DNA sequence: TATTGTTATACTCTATAACTATA
DNA sequence: TATAGTTATAGAGTATAACAATA
């Protein structure tokens, strides 16, 4: 048998994809993790930092630095929650929305290039299968 | 559309699998990366450190520490290449072969648990598709 | 008492640069 | 000059612990 481990396949597939998406995002001044944050905020805006962190399954302390960076780039803004002043509500700026749209297109293109080795059906199926595993 | 990014899916699928394989390997005193090294050595033993590194697509400096660890656990042994004394030939010890066999079974079981959400056909297909992408 | 954001800190994984010994 | 292994080091990315403000 001697086939490659599933862990190896997942790790290196991710690695190869990142080698495409990283450069693709460079013109927009963000990386994949930052785009993911913009994405969850676009789905449900505004979110508290902790809610955003939970949706991406990252630690809230990691989210602090991520939001710091995005705020520094003026892609998101923080404001205190009106009813619970422990919380920061984070929302996309206009510029953040534009960056999400353009960066998102760039990533989709990179994904298409990455998946070009597969027939379109299989590419869709791969995404579907991974989605069911998470 | 708003589906999750392929990068996110790959990253978190790997993360979840690691949460199963890590504990599964603990009784054998190794982690997934170390098992992967044992695996390439089993396929083509002996290999120079650099050849082993190339097969796993990791840096030769990373391989040094990895082999150090495995040698410390007496799972592999180094000896100088007879014709080129710059090279270290690395080979499995008997104990290394045993650990590979038992650890490999533990990982396969963890993979099966991870893939249990999918029909068997789809699980095999997922592996096949990932393999074609790398 | 518990929660949110924050900071300081440490750990893992990885790669780059420079060294050595060989070729 | 080039290559294999090694070491020192630095950069991501991540998490844990402790703190302040607020609930």
Image (cartoon, coloured by chain):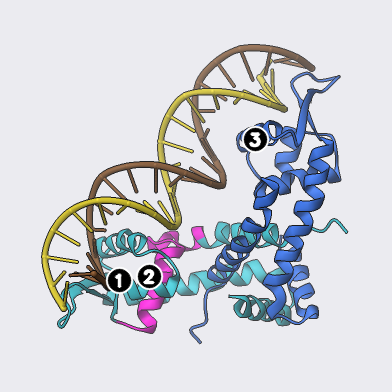
Chain colours: A blue, B cyan, C yellow, D brown
Relative to residue B109, is residue B68 depicted above or below? above
Residue occupied by mark 1: B49
Q: Where is residue C6 in the image (x, y as percent from the top left)?
A: 61, 24
| Element class at badge 3 | helix
Residue occupied by mark 3: A69
Q: Whole-Å distance between the Cαs marked 3 and 1? A: 40 Å
Left or right: residue D21 versus residue B62 is right
Q: Residues within 10 Å of mark 1 (few under 14, many from 20)?
A: many
Q: Tell me where residue A51 sits by quadrant.
A: top right
Q: Are marks 3 and 2 in contact (CB under 8 Å)?
A: no
| Element class at badge 2 | helix
Tell me if I can see residue A56 in this picture: no
Q: Are marks 3 and 1 in contact (CB under 8 Å)?
A: no
Q: Where is residue B132 in the image (x, y as percent from the top left)?
A: 62, 80
At 67% from the left edge and 78% from the top edge, which residue is drawn? B129
Q: Whole-Å distance between the Cαs marked 3 and 2? A: 35 Å
Relative to residue A123, is residue A82 depicted above or below? above
Outermost residue on the bottom side: it is A1
Q: Residues within 10 Å of mark 2 (few under 14, many from 20)?
A: many
Q: Tell me where residue B123 sits by quadrant.
A: bottom right
Q: Is the magenta stretch mostly helix, strand or loop?
A: helix
Residue A53 counted in the magenta span: no
Tell me if I can see residue A93 in this picture: yes
Q: Where is residue A66 in the image (x, y as percent from the top left)?
A: 65, 37
Q: What stretch is highlighted in magenta?
A: B22-45
* Image quadrant occupied by the C terminus of chain A: bottom right
Q: Give the camera-side residue of A7 and A121.
A: A121
Numbered badge on residue B53: 2
Do the residues at discs 1 and 2 belong to one chain?
A: yes
Q: Nearer the viewer, mark 3 or mark 1?
A: 3
């Amino acid at each position: 048998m001697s086939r490659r481990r599933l862990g190896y396949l997942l790790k290196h597939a991710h690695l190869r994809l990142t080698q495409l998406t990283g450069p693709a995002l460079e013109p927009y001044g963000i990386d994949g993790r930052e785009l993911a944050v913009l994405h969850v905020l676009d789905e449900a805006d505004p979110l508290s930092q902790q809610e955003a962190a939970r949706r991406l399954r990252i630690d809230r302390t990691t989210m602090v630095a991520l939001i710091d960076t995005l705020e520094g780039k003026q892609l998101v803004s923080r404001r205190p929650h009106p009813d619970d002043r422990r919380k920061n509500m984070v929302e996309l700026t206009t510029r953040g929305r534009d960056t999400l749209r353009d960066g998102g297109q760039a990533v989709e293109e990179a994904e298409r290039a990455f998946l070009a080795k597969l027939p379109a059906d299989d590419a869709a199926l791969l995404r579907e299968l991974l989605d069911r595993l998470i």
